[in-house]
Amino acid sequence: MIQRNSLLDILLKVVLYGYGTLLIWEWLQPVNQLTDTDNMGVFIVFVCLSLLSYFLQVHWVVRIMILVGYIILSIQYLYSQFSLFDLAWIGELISDMKMNITRMVEADWMLLTNSFRTLLFFILIWLISYLIHYWVAVRRNLFLFFLLTIVFLAVLDTFTPYDADGPIIRVVIIGFAVLGLLAFFRLFEQEKLSVSIRGLRNWLMPLTIMVLFSGTIGFAAPKLKPQWPDPVPFITSYSNKSTGDSNKAGSKRVGYGENDSQLGGSISDDHAVVFYADAPTRHYWKVENKYYYTGKGWTRLDYPGELTEYDNDRDMVNLTGTELPGMKLQELKTTVKMEQFYNHVPYPTPSILKRVSAEGADQYIFNDSTNLLTAQSNSWGRLKLTDYEVNYYLTTFDRNYLKKVTSANDVPKDIIGIYTQLPRNLPERIRNLALEITSDQDNWYDKAKAIENYFDGPKFVYDKQDIPYPEEQQDYVDQFLFETLRGYCDNFSTAMVVLLRSLDIPTRWAKGYSDGVATIKNGESVYMITNNNAHSWVEVYFPEVGWVPFEPTKGFNNTNQFYDASLNTNSNANDHDTAVTTQEKKEATQSDKKTLPEIDKPNQSTSSKLDGVYWKNVLQNTAIGLAGVTIFVFLLYQSRRKWLPYVFITRYKGKNGTDTFTSAYHVLLKQLNRAGVPRPEGQTLREYAVYVDRVYHMANNNMQQMTKEYERIIYRGDQENQAWRQYQELWENLIKETTS
Amino acid sequence: MTYEGKHPKLNEVIRNIEKVIIGKRDIAELSVVALLAGGHVLLEDVPGVGKTMMVRALAKSISADFKRIQFTPDLLPSDVTGVSIYNPREQEFFFRPGPIMGNIVLADEINRTSPKTQSALLEGMEEASVTIDGVTRVLEQPFFVMATQNPIEYEGTYSLPEAQLDRFLLKMRMGYPNIYEEMEVLHRARLASPLESLEPVMSLVELRSLQQESRAVIVDDTIKHYIVEMTQTTRHHRSVYLGASPRGSIALMKASQSYALLCDRDYVLPDDVQYLAPFVLSHRLILKSEAKYEGITAEQVVAEIINNIPVPVKRAVNE
């Protein structure tokens, strides 16, 4: 009997652990597809290893040694530049961990290195496999995890590009089979029957038939179309609307890190000063670029690992006296005094940064893909700068040089891949419009200018109020170009990017601040940049020259008059028919506001890759949120000794009767158990009460008094006991005592 | 161990006994418990610790007929039960009742007499009647036997068979008094025996009504379950050859009821059961010989069982 039972036990565990491994594998599968996580095999092996160690009941010390060793070796194998036998990798690993922990404390999730992310992922998988072990070894039940897996897959299927049809069918069918088997084992265990092959076969036959039958029915049965519209845009637009109304205009656009994934809606004025700068000339201030257009807005995409670090107060480049093709450099210096503090550092544009200096900062990190500049200190991690000085080369571009570019032949492949991305369902009429506007132009520069001028026409109105969000199935740009024709910088700049991209010209969306207002502060002439100056514009890639800014937003050409001769003031009056002359004028002004010559080096190229990065962010945020909630719930549960009694105190207030007394007394017993004063099973309540009163120094012998009454209820069978009122205070005093 | 007052009438009896026997309140209480439950007591101890004194004090406190039998090897059953004697003048037999025909009977050194004579007493204890010369004579109620036996001497003793031990409700040991108690004993021994000055504090009628009352004490199903679980566990215990019988369960319940009454309570607590179980159950267990060799005693087994059975703290039955 004993032997049979243990055989049964082993069989049961094999089934459960095997299915647990399958479930984890199904969890890891989408991670592989949705993110740029590679080498999934390493993690699968880890899952198997850890579950195997639980199955074989390896001593926990040994298990931890094996698993930690495996993690370290995997990270070494995947990331280290040193060989395993060169012990330098240990030092490398330790310094890497140190740096990452600092970044983690600073909540700089984006700056975490891949090796550290891998470590965190390992820890997560470890936790999950422990959970599986718990469910298998203690609960003997995987139903909860089974259910969670289905929910997880369903959510992924709904909200992400991941196609979970296959996995769901797999999980459900195998899940039903395992649940059926479990029921079999439990039944036999309960009835103390021995497991025979025949019994198993008799059970398995109907089980298989039922699973297959229901699976087939479920698969083949006609299904309703989705009953609700796709919830994703609805949820995001809803949350955006609700925040959009309460937020001020500037902060909505300039609160960096906030997303631009749902553009549209009205914005209101916000005159709060962001910073003062004593720049020698007017120019824009850039914060970052975005380049993934979703049809509703811009998604922030980062390429971890493309961060360049620069030391504080050191030259990043020195181009003094250098001639660059197609542009002129003017070395300038500006001091910026921030009034609102952000993690990012606004810098002059179009320019090449020479040097950034600030007190307290040790390094600057420049994201080559988003052009986001952030400051760091060795001791504090990420900094929010208050005052800093920027040395930079303000650039102007040679118009004739730019006009030579007529095709993408000389543009690197990856730039083309990323910066001509458009949503698949972009309406065809946008491209037709782009072709129509630029039909007379043959080079990229003239085409961009033609589009700029198109927006300058009387058809378009600059307005910050009553700007709608696009309809559910509507493209943001399409709505602006063909329906509303009204909007602010985001409308104009996004529309221009999309128009240019539809002509296969690599373009990106830039955001930051416009030049601001000249004013006097502390006796010095400075530019004051407020939230109202939050702005977005367009940058077009020209081979050899780099990114050249264009300004499609109506009304913003005025800013250029301070650059160069005031050629531009009457350009508002131009219309489409006089495109040539307008173009001439605008070109003159445009030529002053130029570009960053850095050439972006994004990874690979395809838009599915970008999808992956986006969903990786979503997954990360969800994971962090879930982890937070889990930790919160766990802490709440752990500290229930402290707060639960107060819940019960309110619950039993004003009640009376036998049931109240009994349940209050039971609550007290449980609470005492939690408080570390448990009652041995063989101890009578009376003896226990004496002990409790002694432990808590109850002068009135609260517990003994209550126990005496309680005894009357349970051992005498008093049904009409109304004594609770009388004992309530004693009870409250004692249970409060247990929380301390 | 309990913190409630005693039943006033019973307390008087116990105080009376305490005047004579010093420091043995628990034994006095247990004797009263047995008396109330209608059971009998086996006192096992060496001579000279006050067994007889104790019984006499109890008998004197109740205005009851007290009889004493000193068991010897040559005692005959008729010496216990009584005998019919031929009266030549009347020309007929008349019955001379033996010492068993009393309310409170002290059976001293019960293991010294032959099994035949022991049986005469034990039959009377069990059936509350004796059969003499074909005539069954019912014993007057209350009928309460306190037997004593000396555990030291084995020469010329007939130890009671296990089946007959079962007839006793409680088996207990007096034990020696502690140093202060014994000094107090000496102090009192200088004076006249206090036994002589004892006055009865309870009538037979009162005793009978208290016996009735003890039978009315509430035993909730949870407690019954607890009692049965305890006796049943003795039957499966690894050291026990023969466990307690259902009679043991009944005895434990009745004793608990009486004890509850003594504590002036009309319902039984698990505490009562736990307190009485060693006295009620120990002599009903027959241990396996290997357990005996290991030095395990029946008292230890009962104590272990008490510790291991969960005390019911919720109502077992849903109304």
Image (cartoon, grey):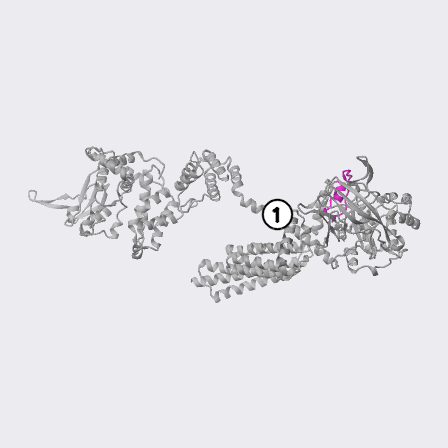
Q: Who's the residue at 52% across and 62% down the image? A: A14
**Between residues A454 and B269, which one lies in front from this camera angle?**
A454
Can I make out residue A734 in this image? yes
Instruction: Using a 10 Å C-alpha cutoff, classify the residue at mark 1 as few (fewer than 14 neighbours), some (14 to 19) or many (20 or more).
Output: few
**Between residues A715 and B20, which one lies in front from this camera angle?**
B20
Residue position for label 1: A628
x and y percentages locating residue A165 in the rendered image: 65, 59
Amino acid at circle 1 = Gly
- Pointer 1 chain: A
Magenta stretch: give its range. Answer: A248-274
**Residue A476 versus residue B32 in the image, above or below:** below
User: Viewed as shown, does residue B310 lie left or right of A625?
Assistant: left
For mark 1, give the secondary structure. helix
Is residue B26 in the magenta section? Answer: no
Prevalent SS, magenta region: loop
x and y percentages locating residue B169 in the rendered image: 28, 46
x and y percentages locating residue A382 in the rendered image: 69, 46
- In which quadrant of the rendered view does residue A434 lie? bottom right
Q: Quadrant of the N terminus of chain A?
A: bottom left
User: Viewed as shown, does residue A314 lie left or right of A707?
Assistant: right
**Between residues A361 and A688, which one lies in front from this camera angle?**
A361
